[in-house]
Amino acid sequence: MARSRGYEWATGLLWLNWELIAGENFHRLNRPWGVELFVGMLGAFEVRLTCGTVTPSAPKPRTVLALLALNAGSVVHLDQLVEELWEHRPPGSPSTTLQTYVYQLRKLLTPGSRGGTALQTKPRGYQLLLGENAQVDVRSFEALLTRGRKSLDAGAHLEAAGLLREALGLWRGPAFGGIVQGPVLSAYATHLEESRKSAMELCFEADLALGRHRHVVDELSGVVRSHPTHEGFSAKLMTALYRCGRKVEALEVFRRLRAEFVDQLGLEPSAALHDLHQRVLTDDHSLSPASEPETAVEAAQVPRIVTAPPQNGSTLAQIPPASFHFVGRQAELGLLVGLFGPAEAERRPGLRMAEVTGPPGVGKSTLAVTVAHQVRQSYPDGQVFVDLTPVNNGTATLAQVLTGAMRAAAVPLPEGESDPAALAYAFRGWSADRRVLVVVDDVMSTEQVHCLHPSGPGSGLLVASRRRLHSPGATAVVDLAPLPVAEGVHMLAAIIGEQRVAAELDSAVELVHACRGLPLAIRAVGGRLAYRTRWTLAGMVFRLSEHPDWPLRVSAGAVPLRETLLGNYTSLPEAARGAFRTIVERGADEVTAQWLAGALCLDPVDAEQLLEALADSFLLEEVVDTGHRYRLPAMARLLREADIPLTRQTEYMDLPRQCTASPA
């Protein structure tokens, strides 16, 4: 095998040398002259010539071109490309495979060569040369950021603000969207995100120096919501609010930041932020703006720092990356891909809407995102993604989240409007002539998603919810259950490696049982084992057995499952909360409508409706038999066993002492 691999690499080098001598001249022939090239990586990956978009469709050529464009003018060696594409698992003939990718890229870039752009073969690697009319948005952003920083240091605030806002306007979404990232691109994406934050902070600094505090206060509020532990953003919001005469709100910003630091990090904010807090408290005159505030006309001419709309034919693509560890769900995946795929769109052009429901941690969001990626080509006008988690945990209003999502999608909004009804009309008008897919995550009511119904023919709406919504317009409903044991073990093997699982198969099965078959919990356990290669699966089983309530501590995003599950409870009507408390406090594992009616002195029909409401919130599950019974699911039993208090939001009813019953 070693001999074969060495022979293959030698053959690859001979091929490279042949290309170097003869092939490059061939690739320069027969190309039109004077065509510009644009490579966009600050958002969905995009390659454009003046004749149109030529973005590679296959994942690996995208990665190759992205790496070459980032290093334009320099040679990217074969070993760098191999590591980026395959890391430690290259195919049997990596250089030959790379030659195929480079050949495909040359065909795509052929119309642009005469402007000076060329993909050249070099000894042991490749080099992308850019013509004078070519543009790589990452390079443009970095150049503008450097110039803006220098202008700010020199005290040229107006020039700095313009350069920095121009730099931020190049961003269309997360860097390298649609590219499978290896170690180099992943590290560079992190670097670019930090540079973007730095550009935003410097831009706000310049704006405040220019007296634009009234103009930027709303922008800063949104940025702080997205980055709640970033001291620089919070400090500038406090300053802007104070200068707007909103001292109490400025102090509240500090209070929230300090609470985030203490709760998440166990630390206090920096001394500089404490000093700013003290200066706000004492009305320190140094907080007054050095420049006169801008007029409304001057402020209106300043572009907002928002995600830039798609331009020049680029596609709106907001869907988060698909999970590498997605397993199973083939029946559900087939149903949804069939519903949202091209054939159904041509046959029935009306709105296709589906709900994916299930208890917290069961994989609803992952399934929705996977479906969205698989049907992307069916929606030529793009995909919109909205996460309503900030609304449900109280950190943002529905209008704020919807406004941010619509601005990111370049939906024209009425000036000053924040009413959800007005936003709904604006979204319908924008989508009327478009075929788009809208994916809305963590929906808790039909009212929340009503504003995001696209009106264009053939459009789709995919909703993920931890509650059965019973939406009138739903075309399909997918109710997700925990993974079967076999699929759970398969998922664990995908995370920690098949060899470790095969060596301790019984313990792997026990771990899946301990995770209650929840993909979120399996990923958490697998992630921990992946970093601790010396730990055994049996040892992990023992650790988990000492903390039976550990699944409640697993985080869904930034929120533990315990809080998500309790959110299902607290969002229920008072009567349903009272019924659930009664079931938990009396230690009932299974109940019927007759039992609940006797316990609460209710009509059996009303008791049945309460049980159905609890089942729709996945706090009960229906037992499929002739007895029409309900039981506590595994996670709800953990809430009871962990003795987590269920706070009474209201005194639903003080149960009469004579109303006693036992489970039927």
Image: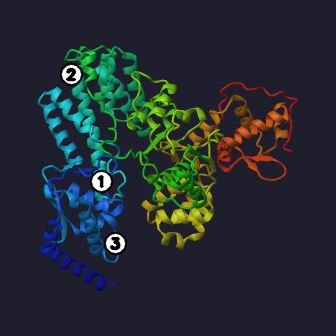
Query: Mark 2 is on which residue type?
Result: Leu
Q: Secondary structure at mark 2?
A: loop
- Sequence-wise, the earlier of marks 2 and 1 is 1
Q: Secondary structure at mark 1?
A: helix
- Residue lying at 76% horizontally and 26% vertically, measured from the top left: 653
From the image, tell me which residue sits under label 2: 210
Residue 520 is situated, as x and y percent measured from the top left of the image, at 53, 52
- Classify 46 as above or below 469: below
Residue 660 visible in the current orientation = yes
Give the side of residue 655 with respect to residue 361, left or right.
right
Foreground residue, 332 or 518? 332
- Classify 113 as above or below 297: below
Q: CA distance from mark 2 to mark 1?
A: 35 Å
Label of residue 187 in the image: 1
Q: Quadrant of the C terminus?
A: top right
Query: Mark 1 is on which residue type?
Result: Ala
Q: CA distance from mark 1 to mark 3?
A: 20 Å
- Sequence-wise, the earlier of marks 1 and 3 is 3
- Sequence-wise, the earlier of marks 3 and 2 is 3
Q: Quadrant of the N terminus?
A: bottom left
**Circle 1 residues within 10 Å: few <14, some 14–19, many ≥20:** few
Q: Secondary structure at mark 3?
A: loop
